[in-house]
Image (spheres, grey):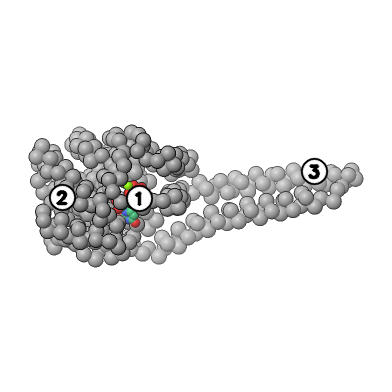
Amino acid sequence: MTPPILYIVIPCYNEQAVLPMTAPLFRQKVLDLAGAGKVSADSRVLFVNDGSKDDTWSIIRSLAASDPVYEGVCLSRNQGHQNALLAGLMTARSRADITISIDCDGQDDINAMDKMVDEYLAGMDVVYGVRSKRETDTWFKRTTAQGFYKVMSALGADTVYNHADYRLLSRRALDGLAQFREVNLFLRGLVPLVGFRSSSVYYERHERLAGESHYPLKKMLSFAFDGITSLSVKPIRLITALGFLISLCSFIGIVWVLLTKLFGAAVSGWASMTCAIFFMGGVQLLCLGVIGEYIGKIYNETKARPRFIISETTFADGPAPVDHAQER
Ligand code: UDP
Ligand code: MG
């Protein structure tokens, strides 16, 4: 059996500080794996420039000029981590037998790739990189991130615990993923839905080598909310349940009011009235908000805008990668 062609897919957004440090590490990893005969010598490191405002793209271009192991695609604008990753995966789909996606900041241990490739060679189509501990993250990031996984699974969006976007996908799995046309992209929730045999590889997460995280709390919260509303309709069911519960309470309340009235102990009732009005107003707005969130998602899906547009590549051959969301 000829060894598989591996593409390491790396989304980069404003990473000029860290890219020159981590790119040689990725290159070395590909060379080592190829040297050990586990992957083909045609394996590559593919960077996706997600509309960076700094020198990231020129760094990628000069890397590609310096060594054929490096390749790059440039998106026409910033599309966000998930879309950039998808653009890279769809570019690699026609060229690679396996892809491993990873962040470019050196936080994820690249040595786990050896085990990932071993798992693939043992017959897995999807191999999740799972953080065994998060000691290098701040207490805050660790707790919020773990709370995120717990809330996600409680709300019915199944994700692999402590797995981010460091994973190996086979060509088959990529083809499967390409059939998911959703614009509200949440890859770590979609990959389990693609199916195939999967396994996990454990690694320790390090600190960012340089540069800053692009996921401050605000973005993390919106990412979590997107994840939940993209994968699960449970929140809407919760609203229905809440509606039932409140209706039941109100019914009991009405009976109580009538009884009090009948037996003559009616009080002026201002406090309970206002409380009820405020409470109902609040609950209704909250519920409308959640429903609105889903309508917003439907709105975006019906528009079926492209999830990424590639403006430039460092290679000339091969079919131009397209976004399959446009084909429906
Ligand atoms: N990233 C991207 N587009 C964005 C934001 C981030 O391609 O709009 C990339 C970024 O360059 C990095 C990865 O996504 O390679 C993860 O981002 P980051 O390390 O900032 O997130 P964290 O590890 O703090 O969750
Ligand atoms: Mg990071």
Disc 1 crowd rating (10 Å Cα; few below 14, some 14-19, many 20+) is: few
Which residue is disc 2 drawn over? 44
What secondary structure is found at the residue carrying circle 1? loop
Is the distance from the Cβ of mark 1 to the nearest ligand 1 atom less than 8 Å?
A: yes
Q: Residue 54's spot in the image, x, y percent?
A: 27, 61
Where, quadrant-wise, is the C terminus in this rendering?
Answer: bottom left
Instruction: Left or right? Give the position of 185 relative to 116.
Output: right
Q: Residue 112's spot in the image, x, y percent?
A: 24, 37
What secondary structure is found at the residue carrying circle 3? helix
Which residue is disc 1 drawn over? 213
**Residue kind at label 1, given as amino acid type:** Ser
Which residue is disc 3 drawn over? 256
2 or 1: tag closer to the N-terminus: 2
In three-dimensional space, the C-alpha distance between marks 2 and 1, rounded to whole angstroms, equals 26 Å
**On screen, 107 above or below 307?**
above
- At a point 41% along the width and 60% down the height, the residue shown is 301
The quarter of the picture where residue 319 lies is bottom left
Disc 3 crowd rating (10 Å Cα; few below 14, some 14-19, many 20+) is: few
Instruction: Left or right? Give the position of 292 relative to 106.
Output: right
Where, quadrant-wise, is the N terminus in this rendering?
Answer: top left
- At a point 28% along the width and 65% down the height, the residue shown is 76
Q: Residue 201's spot in the image, x, y percent?
A: 28, 35
Q: Which tag is nearer the camera, tag 2 or tag 3? A: 2
1 or 3: tag closer to the N-terminus: 1
**Residue kind at label 3, given as amino acid type:** Trp
2 or 3: tag closer to the N-terminus: 2
> 36 or 18: which is nearer to us?
18
Residue 327 visible from this viewpoint: no
